Image (cartoon, rainbow, N blue to C red):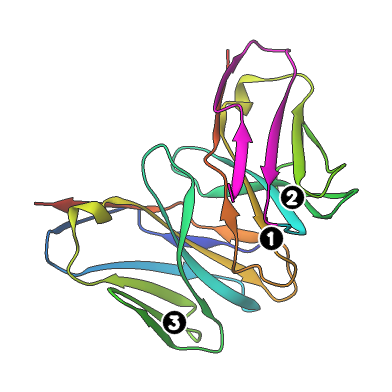
Amino acid sequence: NAGVTQTPKFRVLKTGQSMTLLCAQDMNHEYMYWYRQDPGMGLRLIHYSVGEGTTAKGEVPDGYNVSRLKKQNFLLGLESAAPSQTSVYFCASTPRGKSYEQYFGPGTRLTVT
Amino acid sequence: GEDVEQSLFLSVREGDSSVINCTYTDSSSTYLYWYKQEPGAGLQLLTYIFSNMDMKQDQRLTVLLNKKDKHLSLRIADTQTGDSAIYFCAETSTGGFKTIFGAGTRLFVKA
């Protein structure tokens, strides 16, 4: 049981490049989330999903897209990276109705130059 | 909108108790949490408390909730150097999917 995994762990992009971050969970959780963490700030929710095929905007969705084609995977895409998207990105998952059981991945550190 | 605030730094000596405080604004909060983040790692759920509780104890950790003042605290007894980390306060409101996090309190434990 690996829990929540994220790939890649590190990435450096040039402004305007695109990339996809992958989150996978093997706990059969219904809900999945993408957060970003910036220095001196708490985690901010980018997008979330309450089930396969459904996604919704969080607090800071601009510049990101997501897809949940399979229950175990939640993808975060950056179509045209900007320096303001330099951050550490965390994925998390919870079972339905148990938001107090939120499991986090190890994070992806993204630098946009 | 909802907000969660906590002080940024706390320094204690090894063996002392640490108390990390947090205030929140959402009166419909259902769950309140404390997470721990060690350098280069993700967030680890330490403990949580339901809004209808006043206190929860789990080994060295004691969580106190004052709903009237919207104040949450985490007490770590006999603080060890391994407790050095960033501690995040967070809350989820009733029926909500979103968890709102504070900016984190960096705990330094001096030997």
The front one of A76 and A40 is A76
**Between marks 3 and 2, how big is the CA–CA gap?**
27 Å
| Image disc number at residue B98 | 1
Q: Circles 1 and 2: CB distance less than 8 Å?
A: yes
Q: Which residues are magenta?
A: A1-27
Residue indicated by mark 3 = B65
Disc 3: host chain: B
Residue B96 placed where, x, y %?
Answer: 73, 68
Residue at the spot 51% in from the left edge and 49% down from the top edge: A42
Residue A54 relative to residue A113: left or right = right
Residue A39 relative to residue B92: left or right = left
| Image disc number at residue A58 | 2
* Residue B40 picture quarter: top left
In the rendered image, the vertical position of residue A82 relative to residue B84, given as above or below: above
Residue A29 placed where, x, y %?
Answer: 72, 58
Q: Residue furthest right?
A: A53
> What amino acid is found at the position of numbered circle 2 in the picture?
Gly
For the residues beneath circles 1 and 2, the answer to whether they share a chain is no
Disc 1, SS:
loop
**Between marks 1 and 2, how big is the CA–CA gap?**
8 Å
Q: Quadrant of the N terminus of chain B?
A: bottom right
In the rendered image, the vertical position of residue B41 relative to residue B18, given as above or below: above
> What amino acid is found at the position of numbered circle 3 in the picture?
Leu
**Between marks 1 and 3, how big is the CA–CA gap?**
20 Å
Disc 1: host chain: B
